[in-house]
Image: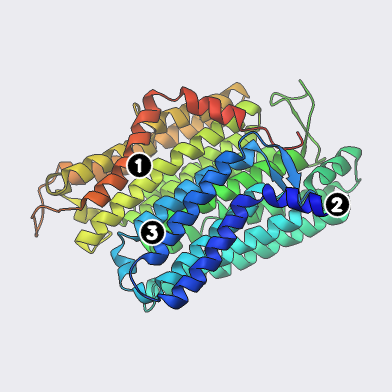
Amino acid sequence: MGDNILNNIVLFYPEITLVVTLCALVFSDLLMKGKGQFTGWLLLGGFCLTGIFLLLQNGYSESVFDDMFAVDSFGIYFKVILILSGIFIVLFTMRSRELERNMQRIGEYYMLIAGMMLGMFLMVGSTNVLLMYLAFEMTSISSYVLTGYIKGSLKSAEASMKYIIFGAVSSGIMLYGLSLLCGVTGATDIYAINASLVEGVGQPMVLSTAVLMIIVGLGFKIAVVPFHFWAPDVYEGAPLVITAFLAVASKIAAFAMLIRLFSVSFLVHVADTQSTGLLNVIEGLNWNIVLSGMSALAMIVGNLAALWQTNIKRLLAYSSIAHAGYILMGIVVLTEEARSAMMMYIFIYLFMNLGAFYIAMLFSNKLNSESIEDYKGLGFRAPFESVAMTVFMIALAGLPPTAGFIAKLYIFGAAMNAGWLWLVFIAGVTAVISLFYYIRIVRNMFLYNPEGESGQLYFDVFSKVIVLLLLIPTLFLGVYFGPLIKLARTSINIFGM
């Protein structure tokens, strides 16, 4: 028994490192409250050490703590992406003017980031629905507080309140769905749930209701239509750094949890049964039809609503809703090709979306404005940052030679090969629509003369280095993407399958 626990702990080092980092942040904040960015560098070091432990786990395929948690290539892939996003968010924070005014409480901010990261790690690796829900709530509660972090800001307080209300309702619905699923299958382990469903439980209506309720909860977290209402207001009211974190890390963790749950619990691998090569085990519910409708609506609503936005954060919020629709296409199909395409898309999405948010934050710092109209003439005042923003916009639109083109090419190809032609058609049309609002930002920067204060905008070397760290992968993966495809394909192995 003791040896088993020790072996489990060894496989749990990344999560333990995050817990130790969180505790260290608490004590350091007590001793050095408000003294510079020491807690930020401490968290950055903790994230880097966690990343090292993750890389050392490469090749593992084990279940720990009585089959509650899986350490496999699938989970490690997503955890590495999450750690990368966490590292960038800490670096963003160190250059955020919004958060400079709250330096006395910056330790609390970093603690919440660490807690949210731990919750997302547990979401990615959980193989028991009870742990999945606890991890989901741990992530959600941290994000609620971070959204309202700026003290005295009415917009931030309003965003946090809306987020809590929508989150509590969706979380309750998801919990009820999970309880129904456990009740009819008599199991909480996702593999045992699958075995029970394959044998047949004779309650298709209850199962259908349970799955739909689970989709509601996870649909809220990934901000997909029709569970997206919270996103624009929350993204606009939250600090820009937290908006970026929610748009990337929180969404990625929810997608990882959704893929694992659906791949393991609700499907059995039976060759040549359907165009997807997978057999639906939930009688009476074509869940892929439900998800395809959500995917199509997310692409349509997200891109059309973004056309009318004048605030950069709201525009990127609707853009992220549209991208959730594109990624969701992979879960609709759920073949190995589709899952690897999703994983590749998510990796690329990390860099191009964080890049767009970071440039928006730099401009907001200098202009004291988030209006796209104030971007007029920035191509002359801040040429390097404006060119970088143009690249990120082109990548988000899915144009070559950026990585965004490769991401869309593979996810569209996977859906087309599975016979979802109508969904690919909608994705293609909405991708063209997205060009209008992405290029509008580029037009404002380069085709208009500066208005009002037209002096040169200067950014320090540290800020430029961060831009390059996001820009280089966005361009490089657009022309040399073979290793990423190979990594995604070797990482789709979900423990036990």
- Identify the residue under disc 1: 470
* Mark closer to the chain start, 3 or 1: 3
**Foreground disc of the pair 3, 1:** 1
What residue is shown at x 49% (from left), y 34% (from top)? 427
* Mark closer to the chain start, 3 or 2: 2
| Image vertical order of residue 316 relative to residue 158, above or below | above
Q: Is residue 148 visible?
A: no
What residue is shown at x 61% (from left), y 36% (from top)? 58
- Residue 55 occupies which quadrant of the picture? top right
Q: CA distance from mark 1 to mark 2?
A: 43 Å
| Image vertical order of residue 492 relative to residue 120, above or below | above
Q: Amino acid at mark 1?
A: Leu
- Identify the residue under disc 3: 241
Q: Amino acid at mark 3?
A: Val
Q: Position of residue 370 (x, y in %)?
A: 28, 59
- Residue 32 occupies which quadrant of the picture? bottom left
Mark 1 crowdedness (10 Å alpha carbons): few <14, some 14-19, many ≥20: many
What residue is shown at x 69% (from left), y 36% (from top)? 494
Residue 478 vs residue 320, the one in the foreground: 478
Q: Amino acid at mark 2?
A: Ala
Give the structural element (helix, strand or loop) at label 1.
Answer: helix
- Identify the residue under disc 2: 187
Residue 432 vs residue 331, the one in the foreground: 331
Q: Position of residue 102 (x, y in %)?
A: 35, 74
Q: Which mark is residue 277?
A: none
- Residue 166 occupies which quadrant of the picture? bottom right
Q: Is residue 338 left or right of residue 157?
A: right
| Image vertical order of residue 167 relative to residue 354, above or below | below
**Dots 3, 2 in contact, CB < 8 A:** no
* Mark closer to the chain start, 1 or 2: 2
